[in-house]
Image: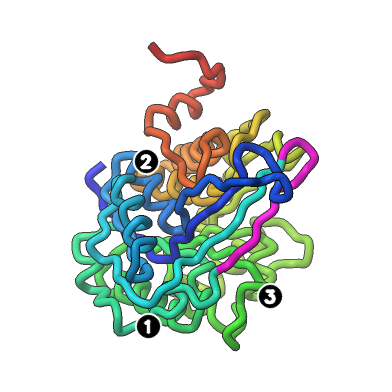
Amino acid sequence: MDKKLITFGEVMMRLSPPGYTMFSQASSFDLVYGGGEANVAISCGYLGMKAAHVTRFPDNALGRAATQFLRKHWLGTINVIYGDNMLGKYFLQKGAVHRSSEVIYEREGSAFSLIKPHMINWEEVLEGADWFHWTGITPAVSEGAAQCCIEAIKTANKMGIKVSGDINSRQNMWKYGKTMQEVMPELVKNTDIVITSSRGIKEMFGLGESGGGFQGAAKELMEKFPRIEKVVGKTRKSISASHQQIQGKMWTGKQYIKAKKLDITHVIDRVGTGDAYASGLIYGLLQYEKDDMQALNFATAACALKHTVVGDVNMVSVDNVTSLMEGNTSGKIKR
């Protein structure tokens, strides 16, 4: 696909005990890199799109190693900037069956959290791009990151570039004196495609009935922010840490549609599945244009497949996704 995606956000080092061992059992950690927005870009790269990620790394060997990880996975890194000394990191203990996964973050004071708006020329960064993607995590990291994000979104608007935002955010991340209720409206009102949940809409904007449905909340969100073209979510049924069911859903502004439900009976790695959903949605909306149902089915299938891939990133091909869309769930060896 001859379309270019730009993403913006923090990339962290992920450290996990091998396999399904617990922190208390660990004598070593497996290392990968990941971050919501970069995960989306890499996944789109594996789907054949041109993709680049904008971030800030420490000016040291760890920052260069993280940059190399992005390059290895198809991403342009010309707009990565460097400064300060700390790379954000998180520790993941993988859950299994009835034991939940656990995550511990260490990201305060990271090079990315110290980013300032003047550090990035967004017109240069977005030149030739077709799509810009952000998530609600970035404006929660720091005030500088939030300011950079809104500058990027408004520049994309001015340049006629489609903007998507995965706006579900973590309440406990907002520690720099601003709340998500204060910051998020300015970003969302300039966003074309919004990925969220009825709970997220209620928490951030006070819209939708408490415990109410996705469709009603999505309608209210569109009424409040008329620029939004589609509001997209997904239903996840967690039977156990190892068994999940996924179904995409979308309010198009005219109708409420749901994708085929997919049953994931043996989860390998759940981290990054939301990012896989976002990347599948971006690809699907570009590839299928007016066919929202096909785009939604593509996103749901991409999300389901990420549960089978170790690490933060969904490294599957278009053929992998379309095969699952068409009902091929056998997992037979391809020769």
Q: Which mark is residue 288?
A: 2
Q: Residue at x 47, y 14 (%)?
A: 333
Q: Which residues are magenta?
A: 96-106
User: What separation in Å lies between label 3 and label 1 (alpha carbons)?
Assistant: 30 Å
The image quarter containing residue 18 is: top right
User: What separation in Å lies between label 3 and label 2 (alpha carbons)?
Assistant: 33 Å
Pick the residue in front: 61 or 166: 61
Extreme residue in the top direction: 335
Is 307 situated above or below 199? above
Is disc 2 placed on a helix, strand or loop? helix
Q: Which mark is residue 116?
A: 1
Q: Which amino acid, by three-letter code, is at mark 2?
A: Tyr
Q: Which amino acid, by three-letter code, is at mark 3?
A: Gly
Pick the residue in front: 24 or 129: 24
Instruction: Tell which circle, 2 or 1, labels the residue nearer the N-terminal end.
Output: 1
Residue 305: where, in percent of width, then height?
Answer: 52, 34
Q: Residue at x 35, y 79 (%)?
A: 151
Residue 268: where, in percent of width, then height?
Answer: 60, 35
